[in-house]
Amino acid sequence: MNTTASGMSTPGQTVGPFFHYGLPYDGDRDLVTPGSPGSIRLHGTVYDGNGAPVQDSLIEIWQARPDGTVPQEPGSLRRDGWTFTGFGRASTSRDGSFYFSTLAPGATEPGAAPFFAVTVFARGLLDRLFTRAYLPEDEAALAADPLLSSLEPERRRTLVAEKDEQGYRFDIRLQGEDETVFLLFPGR
Amino acid sequence: MELETQSVIDAEISAIAQATEQAGAGELQPHVDYPPYRSSILRHPTKDLRHTDPETIERWAPCFSHRDVDPLESDLTIGQRGEPVGERIIVTGRVTDGEGRPVRNQLVEIWQANAGGRYVHKRDQHHAALDPNFTGAGRCLTDDEGNYRFVSIKPGPYPWKNHLNAWRPAHIHFSLFGTDFTQRLVTQMYFPGDPLFSRDPIYQAITDPKAREMLVATYDHDLTQPEWATGYRWDIVLTGSNRTYTESEDSDL
Ligand SMILES: [Fe+3]
């Protein structure tokens, strides 16, 4: 049966263990050439409920340009080295780590806290998860952010990336004490 | 570790189904905490998802075009030296948002096992033959009416190690983007009448039967082409926060 009853959306299913043949592509994690002017590294590790690294997960980011504008240009699958498309995809390695080479997103509205919109897929994860990786610098903007300010400090911490030499570190914990805050948007 | 039998898994699946039916609480999306799918146990969030309104970037989605996707990528049966083994199929359907409007020019990616149930993947240990003429990955863009179309081979069911004698119903993995970030969907399309449905903890993790059936394609004889391929139709609904229309339409309600 193939119903399109109103209010129903097609359910999600796990990405499974064999997505490496379908989803990764050359240049998927390099929104900009690593090491090019202004480039930063966004990286981290995905952990399960035992604190073990998740080696078969897939992370996607979607972000604004440094000036806060939203890219609407094609080319994410075939990067030309010049066009910033704002979309990237990275599968985790055997140690559960992922990285992106990108630019720091800017505030999309005056005073808004800049963040990477993040989607998490994994074998064993029955539906995709959404989260945000906020940049840590602008403390006033972070304090004013509606989502962050609604969270208890220890939960809030899971959404703020940590600054390091090359860029930012953002670990993702699917479960457990420091479980990342995952988001539910209206509409589904 | 000793694997449990299918009957143990079946009992867990029906216990959850009974409990949800009694509570009248079948879920339209998969229950991420679904222990019969063993690898979900340590990989699902245990805290409630945080209700959040999408911010600017989340009300947009990445843009794809024919610069990204070659039209030939929608035919998984070509590009190798010979014809792949198995039943050639056409899989097509329409991608719409929650109000039935077409999702235009968006990326659809698929990947699947071959006719013998084997993936071209180093971690697939199934003792079924690889097919040198079939790799099992494809892409296309939806057209102006939201239609997508692939030519492929009907995938076989395959064993996995969730429990003893565990077999996945035949399926094609689908990945879709909508017009806003919140519509992002990765799912699986199944074939009608599969005897493995009731035994599969991934499919059964969607506890509402009507929602579950939305993942099953329909055989369509009008789509079937003489001497060439059988046809399956599968429509996809991507609901989300609907940047373009929500505000104006809500005011009409
Ligand atoms: Fe599969």
Image (cartoon, grey):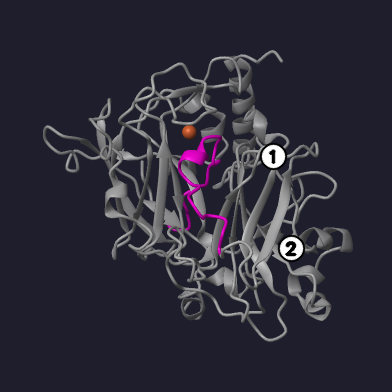
Going by the numbered disc 1, the residue's amino acid type is: Val
Q: Chain of mark 2?
A: A
Name the spot of residue B70 as percent of width and height, x first.
Answer: 31, 55
Question: Magenta residues, as a range?
Answer: A6-31
Q: Is residue B135 magenta?
A: no
The quarter holding residue B201 reads top right
Q: Is residue B198 above or below residue B127?
A: below
> Quick check: B111 left or right of A155?
left
**Chain on which label 1 sits:** A
Q: Residue furthest bottom?
A: A110
**Image coords of residue B48 (percent x, y):** 74, 52
Q: Residue at x 71, y 63 (%)?
A: A133
Q: Residue at x 56, y 47 (%)?
A: B29
Please identify the dominant SS of the magenta region: loop
Answer with mark 2 or mark 1, whichever residue precedes in sequence.
1
Task: Please state the horizontal and vertical placement of residue A110, each as a whole percent of the image.
Answer: 68, 86
Which residue position is annotated with label 1? A54
Q: Work out whether residue B179 or residue B219 is closer to the camera in this orientation and state it.
A: B179
Q: Which residue is mark 2?
A: A166
Question: Of circles 2 and 1, which is in front?
Answer: 2
- Type of amino acid under label 2: Gln
Mark 2 in CB contact with mark 1 (< 8 angstroms): no
Give above or below for B42 relative to B11: below
Label 1 neighbour load within 10 Å: few <14, some 14-19, many 20+:
many
Quarter of the image for residue B219 reads top left
- Residue at the left extreme, as displayed: B226
Element type where label 1 sits in the image: loop
Numbered badge on residue B155 = none
Quadrant location of the N terminus of chain B in the rendered image = top right
- Look at the picture and state if B94 lies above or below A33: above
